[in-house]
Image (cartoon, rainbow, N blue to C red):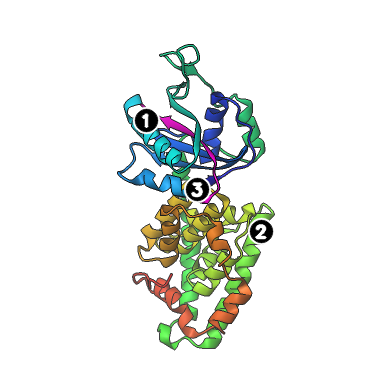
Amino acid sequence: MTTTPKLVLSSPADILAAVPYLVGFHPADSLVVIGFAGAALQLSTRWDLPPEPGDLDRLAPLFVREGVTMAVLVGYGPEPVVDSAVLEAGRLLEEAGVRVTEALRAEDGRYWSYACPTIVCCPDEGLPYDPVSSPVAAEAVVHGLVALPDRGSLRRTVEPSAGGAMREASRRVAADLRARLARPPGQVSDAVAAEFVAGGLARVRAAIDLYGSGGRLDDRAAARLGFDLAIIRVRDEAWALLDDRDAHLALWKDLTRRLDPLHVAPAASLLAAAAWRSGDCALAGMAVERALEADGAYSMAHLLREALVHMLSPGSLLDRMPTPEDLDAEMGPPRGCWLGPLVTWLSGEPSARAG
């Protein structure tokens, strides 16, 4: 599900030019449903084709919950696969009181309209369209939207990219921390925990400001922040500070790509939360996958995956998010046990499953 800026869509060609920017990439074998509240573009969502049985049942409740009154359907792919999905989605929406104003099928640079009543406006061979040169595409770019070539291109933006310098920096940071915490988790003092937490909180805030100004952490600082995020109170500080600034997407995407894949679950979960908040559910889902690949029991990633599966609006969680002050009041002063996940990471043992 993607929330959208104001784009004027007055024709099928406009719709087809807008779709790649609404979902973040040029779709294939997909059903895209765009919802309007009155004349305002409200949200869009994408489904793989063919859908799994029952997948589309979530569509109508989502649109009703978000106040959508009109919808446009666009299916990408061969006619037999697209036809059944478009007809099913249209039926579900109409039954829920959402009016379907246009339904299209696109394939190989041509489109067909299910709403077109005559062969004059929709010939058997379809009509050509160009999603690149359209004024709508230019308008989308002005709004800061990006359309990658395909879904694989989007996935590559969260894949590991660390080179030898980053791996060496991580090794050195881990060695330093291991020397400072050369004791079992249960024997780490509260004073040591307070020092680690205070440093981690400061580094989180500094990193957000740095990326907000267009900067980037060097390898050692990135590695250090990655280890900080093993401490739940530090990770939750970053989560509580999420807002609409692009700095969060840039920071957590950068760390998701650069950190040791075994330790990436916190950063990838923060990227998922930031992407979800911005309306980019495709990126959020891929970030959740990265987090769960690193730690299949990481609870923050599971929470976000459930939100995405059930197509919840980010607003449903925002009102319940604690502030940093709330976290201090709820969690109390730092305790030695808070460093347990970090000590476990440094020992090279399996994850502490504390996330």
Dot 2 and dot 1 residues touching (CB under 8 Å): no
Give the residue at mark 1: 82
Q: Nearer the viewer, residue 266 or 180?
A: 266
**Residue on which disc 2 sits:** 210
Image coords of residue 354 (percent x, y):
41, 73
> Is the residue 213 above or below the residue 56 in the image?
below
Q: In the rendered view, tell whether residue 341 sits above or below residue 74.
A: below
Extreme residue in the left direction: 53
Mark 2 vs mark 1: give the one in front. Answer: 1
Q: Amino acid at mark 1?
A: Val
Find out whether residue 65 is within the magenta segment.
Answer: yes
- Report how many numbered discs are placed on residues in the image: 3
Q: Nearer the viewer, mark 2 or mark 3?
A: 3
Q: Are marks 2 and 3 in contact (CB under 8 Å)?
A: no
Residue in the picture at 56% in, 84% down: 332
Q: Which mark identifies residue 72?
A: none
Distance from disc 2 to disc 3, alpha carbons, whole Å, reads 40 Å
Q: Check disc 2 and report its element: helix, strand or loop.
A: helix
Which residue is identified by label 3? 64
Q: Is residue 160 visible?
A: no
Left or right? Give the position of 220 relative to 298: right
Question: x, y (%) of residue 159?
Answer: 44, 49
Upstream in sequence: badge 3 or badge 1: 3
Q: Mark 3 packing: few (<14 Cα in 10 Å), some, or many (20+)? A: some
Q: Nearer the viewer, residue 195 or 14?
A: 14
Residue segment shown in magenta? 63-78
Judge the density around disc 1: few (<14), some (14-19), many (≥20) Cα neighbours within 10 Å. many
Residue type pointed to by label 2: Leu
- Quick one: label 2 or label 1, which is nearer the N terminus? 1
Determine whether, in the image, residue 214 is placed left or right of residue 232: right
Q: Secondary structure under badge 1?
A: helix
Judged from this view, the residue extending furthest toward the top is 120
